Image (cartoon, rainbow, N blue to C red):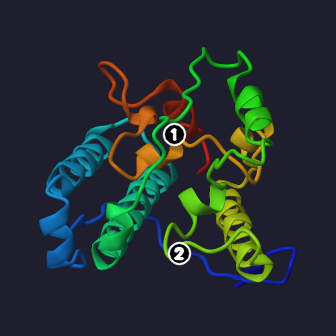
């Protein structure tokens, strides 16, 4: 068993060749409140079939993609269950003014603008750990202990990916990860994953480059 630089044990998980997407852990209350849960499941199931049918993927590339969609769907179900159990959250008073949406071409500075706007104390931009690590239950920004625990989990997940691929995360080098990240990441949990939305080949150029690397 290997460890991270911080001494955290890292087991070598078996490479995934397929996954089973299900709603066994989705409560009846969540299904009743959120009827679109079937649409979300269908979207992830479509991604799963596309991954299986893509002959260009390496074993490691397929494993990484399966891991992503399995984790996203699991987090989605946790959020739906939590919201159904705390239905009063959905009946609260929301701001009259809608969110500010930033659009732009890749590498045009939209992320930089987003991060600048997030510095406004009146802004409520979500944290990366709130969108990608533990979406629920919500924790206070002032709870440094729990926030640090989520940060450690984020680093551990990246280190595991790097260990499997045998190289550093190129996405991090091209797109530095900050505490506050673009909130489009929330859409991934609903089955809207931009990297899978590509014509003909069904996988985007970025994921194809990642998945076709000669890791083995």
Query: Position of 56 compared to 122: left or right?
Result: left
**Percent x, y of residue 90:** 33, 62
Tell me whether circle 2 and circle 1 mark residues in contact (CB < 8 Å): no
Residue lying at the far right in this picture: please name it. 5
**Percent x, y of residue 87:** 30, 72
Along the viewing direction, whichever of 146 and 94 lies nearer the viewer: 94
Query: Position of 87 compared to 194: left or right?
Result: left
**Quadrant, the N terminus:** bottom right
Q: Going 59% across and 24% down the picture, which residue do you hit?
A: 102
Query: Position of 5 compared to 71: left or right?
Result: right
In which image quadrant can residue 156 be found? Answer: bottom right
Q: Going 74% across and 50% down the picture, which residue do you hit?
A: 167
The circle drawn on residue 50 is none
Q: How many marks?
A: 2
Mark 2 nearby-residue class (10 Å; few <14, some 14–19, many ≥20): few
Q: Going 79% across and 77% down the picture, which residue do you hit?
A: 144
Along the viewing direction, whichever of 2 and 214 lies nearer the viewer: 2
Q: Relative to 53, is 16 above or below?
A: below
In which image quadrant can residue 22 be found? Answer: bottom left
Mark nearer the N terminus (2 vs 1): 2
- Element at label 1: loop
**Percent x, y of residue 159:** 72, 64
The circle drawn on residue 13 is 2
Q: Which residue is mark 1?
A: 184
Q: Using the numbered discs, state the Cα–Cα distance from disc 2 to disc 1 in whole angstroms.
A: 29 Å
Mark 1 nearby-residue class (10 Å; few <14, some 14–19, many ≥20): few
Along the viewing direction, whichever of 194 and 80 lies nearer the viewer: 80
In which image quadrant can residue 75 be found? Answer: bottom left
Using the rendered image of the protein, determine whether residue 168 is visible from the camera's viewpoint: yes
């Amino acid at each position: 068993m290997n460890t991270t630089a911080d001494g955290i044990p890292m087991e070598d998980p078996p490479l995934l060749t397929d996954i089973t997407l299900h709603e066994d852990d989705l409560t009846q209350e969540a299904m009743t409140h959120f009827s679109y849960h079937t649409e979300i499941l269908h979207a992830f199931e479509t991604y799963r079939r596309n991954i299986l049918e893509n002959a260009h993927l390496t074993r490691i590339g397929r494993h990484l993609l399966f891991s992503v969609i399995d984790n996203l769907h699991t987090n989605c179900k946790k959020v739906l269950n939590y919201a159904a159990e705390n239905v009063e959250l959905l009946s609260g008073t929301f701001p009259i003014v809608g969110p500010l949406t930033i659009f732009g071409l890749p590498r045009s500075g939209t992320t930089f603008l987003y991060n600048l706007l997030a510095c406004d104390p009146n802004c409520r931009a979500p944290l990366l750990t709130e969108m990608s690590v533990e979406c629920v239950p919500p924790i206070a920004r002032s709870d440094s202990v729990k926030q640090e625990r989520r940060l450690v989990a984020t680093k551990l997940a990246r280190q595991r990916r790097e260990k499997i691929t045998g190289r550093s995360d190129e996405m991090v080098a091209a797109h530095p990860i900050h505490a506050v990240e673009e909130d489009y990441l929330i859409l991934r949990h609903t089955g809207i994953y931009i990297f899978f939305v590509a014509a003909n080949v069904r996988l985007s150029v970025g994921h194809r480059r990642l998945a076709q690397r000669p890791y083995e």
